Image (cartoon, helix red, strand yellow):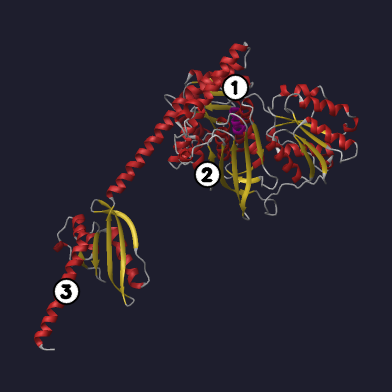
Amino acid sequence: MIPEQRQEEQRRTLEELLKSEEKYRAIISGIEEGLVYADREGRVLEVNDFFLKLMKREKREVLGHTLWDFHVGPVADKLRDHLEKFRRDPHSSQVVYQRNFYGREVILHIKPIYRRQQYDGVLLNIIDVTELVSAREQAQAASKAKSEFLAQMSHEIRTPMNGILGMTELALGTNLSLEQRVYLKGIKSSAESLMSLINDLLDFSKIEARKMEMEASPFDLENLVFETLPPLAVQAQKKKLELICDIPSQVSRAVVGDSKRLQQILINLIGNAIKFTERGEVVFCIQEESRTEDQVFLHFTITDTGIGIPEEKQKTIFGAFVQAESYMTRKYGGTGLGLSISTQLVELLGGKIWVESIVGKGSRFHFTARFGFQKDASGKPVRAETVDFKGLPVLLVDDHVTTSRFLKRLVTSWNLSPTETGSAEDATILLDRARQKKGPPFTVILVDAHLPGQDSFLLLDYLKTEPNLAKSIIMMLNSSGTDGDKAPWKKFGISMYLNKPLKPSDLLEKIKEMTGMAARKEENVAPAPAKLPDQQPRRAYRVLIAEDNIVNQRVAIYMMEKQGHHVSYVQNGEEVLDAMEKNIFDLILMDVQMPLMDGLMATDLIRKKEKATGAHIPIVAMTAHAMKGDRERCLAAGMDDYVAKPLNAADLSQAIERAIQLSRRKR
């Protein structure tokens, strides 16, 4: 190659290099992030415009200086430590952290550069997140302000609501005319509905602020369900709906989880199913979807024959303040918060929620949830007892197809041999055949108390006139659960009743009792242990009530006096301290928010005085503060227990007993 050609080629190569360098500089200059390249000694070799803008420096003021020339104190030391680690370890990964940099909040990426496994320098990437951090802080401040507002509103609403509900409850305990009782029950029902709305709003706020905490406590799944159903069953009976609860025997009952939140979901979903169903049935079912050694994944379904939900609305109903159609709010009431709260509670329980529905045909709501197992002494999951009635024949008489199907599956799981029919006429034919030895005699006969027309009475009349059936176990299944419905059957000598929705364990115990299985088992039951000293019967206490609201003060006084306690009362914390100097009390019911000196400060002063004497007076917080952390704040101040307003006499009594027992242990 001649010299002229070589020079031309070198010139073109140089131009290409310069163009590449210009492109490189243009790229890094245009990036909205700071870039710094430093050599193995930490000297800055290149920076981009954004970095200079952050530092408010000229390029000549930066190039050639070391990285720690621009940092002082612990920050410079930390940077040196990172670079020293990069030198020692060729497998070092980049370091990322957030810090303040020349008045701006930045995310700093420090990435080592290696050539042939040798440290050759470092690349710093600096991202300005000042606006994001500011927005986050503003959002946190807004969230805190909203929570404080809700807490204050909760307190302000609960205080008068305590007076309304408390005084109404006390008035209902007096001699009233029928008309007065109806009016007062209306007031109580409306006040309870308002409290339910307030609680929904507070729950929604807690979940939205991610302040809802789930508990993990042992509970019996079947017992929880049937503690939840009675008020819902009354609503169903008023609309003449069949409410069925199907919990197969193989479903684990002894589980660990948040029973209160599960109960809240069930009340929302089953309550909605009843509300939006005018005729037919509501069926609640639980199935095991999967299990591991320590956990069970349960699948809950609530099926109704109600109005149904249009397909295009089926996803939106799980949002806050949404119902499928606007007219539903006018016709059925509600805020549309129930499903939104249930959705988020289900997610906190480790599951999901969805719906299948056909307009005019009904809906089926599904949700799943994960629970732990209760363990026995050997560390294995607690299992339900297995029962074998060895094929004893049972006659099921119920005209409702779904109920009859449920009963058949239930008794079959206990190895009873069921025959089902839906009419009294067919039942008598089956009984006649059995009497004539054309079929097995029926050991157990389950009869729906509300067969069409007078069929239930006709069948019972037949059963009582047949001497061959005298040894059969005859049990009535009562739909409403009210004692008034049992009266007609007493004339026929029927004393065995079970209310619908039918609790499987209740039916099982009744059959075991009547067949003698329960009696044989009870022979081996150990006697009940004697009462421990701190389990003595309740007695009358000298109670000091600290409450500045006159109405709420009267409610608490009347509740305590009705329970037989001797009551004194004051209006603020200073008066509490004065009263304790002059009198002896067994317990203090302390409102938290009072003038001059609040309940927390008064409690703190009482506990400080007690350190010198070794005494400990039980103090129960009695407050309208019901947000997350309020209970913990009261206990941290030295209180022994906590009840939220509006006051409930039973809850208050239990809190007093807990506080008394705790105080005895602390002395």
Q: Which residue carries the number 3 mark?
A: 16
Which dot, 1 or 2, sits closer to the camera?
A: 2
Which quadrant holds residue 307? top right
Q: Which residue carries the number 1 mark?
A: 560
In the depicted view, which residue is nearer to us: 465 or 657?
465
Question: Can you give x and y, in whole percent of width and height, for residue 606 in the image?
Answer: 50, 31
Range of the magenta residues? 651-660
Q: Is residue 32 left or right of residue 292?
A: left
Q: Residues within 10 Å of mark 2 (few under 14, many from 20)?
A: many
Q: Amino acid at mark 3?
A: Glu
Q: Is residue 593 left or right of residue 458?
A: left
Q: CA distance from mark 1 to mark 2?
A: 44 Å
Which quadrant holds residue 666? top right
SS of the residue at dot 1? helix
Q: Quadrant of the C terminus?
A: top right
In the depicted view, which residue is nearer to us: 164 or 22?
22
Q: Sequence order check: which comes first, mark 1 or mark 2?
A: 2
* Predominant SS of the magenta segment: helix
In the depicted view, which residue is nearer to us: 588 or 24?
24
Q: Sequence order check: which comes first, mark 3 or mark 2?
A: 3
SS of the residue at dot 2? strand
Disc on res. 622: none
Q: Residues within 10 Å of mark 3 (few under 14, many from 20)?
A: few
Q: Which residue carries the number 2 mark?
A: 353
Dots 1, 2 in contact, CB < 8 A: no
SS of the residue at dot 3? helix
Q: Residue furthest left?
A: 4
Residue 416 seen anywhere in this rendered image of the structure: yes
